[in-house]
Amino acid sequence: MFYRRVRDLREDSDKTQKEIAELLNMQLTVYQRYERGERELPLWAAIKLADFYSVSLDYLVEREF
């Protein structure tokens, strides 16, 4: 599942969950649920993360390796 990619990108960039939650302007607990795969990441947030990490949406959602 692509939530692992979201977590891996965050860890590789040495960012905390709190920092990314702030970037997405959401509560930490909401972001944590996305990272655990308990909630589906909305498209607007996926686009913002792809831009932030300089990766494509395909890469972010594991359509591209």
Image (spheres, rainbow, N blue to C red):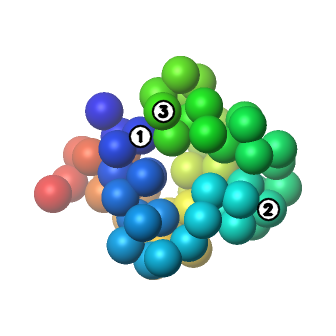
Residue at screen point 34% across, 51% down: 5
Please, what secondary structure does the residue beneath circle 2 have? helix
| Mark nearer the N terminus (3 vs 2) | 2
According to the picture, the residue beneath numbered tag 2 turns out to be 22
Residue at screen point 82% across, 47% down: 26
Residue at screen point 56% across, 72% down: 15
x then y, percent, for residue 8: 35, 58
On residue 36, the disc is: 3
According to the picture, the residue beneath numbered tag 1 turns out to be 3
Relative to 25, does residue 53 appear above or below in the rendering? below
Please, what secondary structure does the residue beneath circle 3 have? loop
Q: Residues within 10 Å of mark 2 (few under 14, many from 20)?
A: few
Of 50 and 26, nearer the camera is 26
x then y, percent, for residue 64: 20, 54
Of 40 and 29, nearer the camera is 29
Relative to 1, does residue 13 appear above or below in the rendering? below
Alpha carbon separation for disc pair 1 and 2: 18 Å
Alpha carbon separation for disc pair 3 and 2: 17 Å
Of 4 and 52, nearer the camera is 4
In the picture, which quadrant includes the N terminus? top left
Residue at screen point 51% across, 40% down: 35
Q: Residues within 10 Å of mark 1 (few under 14, many from 20)?
A: many
Residue type at mark 1?
Answer: Tyr
Alpha carbon separation for disc pair 3 and 1: 7 Å
- Are the residues at dot 3 and dot 1 in contact (C-beta closer than 8 Å)? yes
